[in-house]
Image: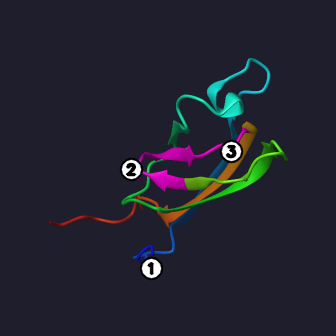
Amino acid sequence: MPKESIRMKRLRSNLVGVDGGEVVLFSDFEDGGEMWTGRGQRERRRHINFSEPYITEPTVQMSVSLWDMDAATVIRADVRAESVTAAGFDMVFRTWGDTRVARIRIAWTAIGELPDEDAWDLY
């Protein structure tokens, strides 16, 4: 059973940045790609750069905004943000078994603290 991951992120100022977008991570049905055939690499990842860097790593939330799956197989998917930094993150989609995925579009949102031009860092 996965370990529960709950945390409160406290921000030092009112400079909260919200960035986001949508990415078609892959579309394998058109060319017989590995996700559609169910053979080969069962993971796809793409690096996403934020519009502006945050002060520290933001909280990143992802969701599937389009999934086109084969109805004859079991639908299995793991979608997560990995390697989150102040500048960006890796969007990761994984599946396994006989699941056949034609295409996936992922929506993402990042929330974190932005630099304050008026703040002085004395240390």
Can you give x and y, in whole percent of width and height, for residue 16 in the image? 53, 67
Quadrant occupied by the N terminus:
bottom left
Which residue of the protein is positioned furthest toward the left in this rendering? 123
Quadrant occupied by the C terminus:
bottom left
Mark 2 falls on what kind of element? Answer: loop
Q: Which residue is mark 1?
A: 4
Q: Quadrant of residue 26?
A: top right
Question: Eyeballing the image, is 39 above or below 54?
Answer: above
**Residue type of the residue flagged with mark 3:** Thr
**Residue type of the residue flagged with mark 1:** Glu
Question: Eyeballing the image, is 94 above or below 37?
Answer: below
Q: CA distance from mark 2 to mark 3?
A: 26 Å
Image position of 61 (left or right of 115): right
> Residue at point 38% right, 51% down?
85
Mark 1 falls on what kind of element? Answer: loop
**Along the viewing direction, whichever of 77 and 72 lies nearer the viewer:** 72
**Along the viewing direction, whichever of 70 and 68 lies nearer the viewer:** 70
Q: CA distance from mark 3 to mark 1?
A: 26 Å
**Residue type of the residue flagged with mark 2:** Ser
Q: Which residues are magenta?
A: 80-100
Would residue 39 be counted in the magenta stretch? no
Q: Which residue is mark 2?
A: 83
Q: Between disc 2 and disc 3, whose residue precedes? A: 2
Q: Which residue is mark 3?
A: 99
Image position of 16 (left or right of 76): left
**Along the viewing direction, whichever of 12 and 104 lies nearer the viewer:** 104
Q: Between disc 1 and disc 2, whose residue precedes? A: 1
Q: Quadrant of residue 8?
A: bottom left
* Viewer-side label of 2, 3: 3
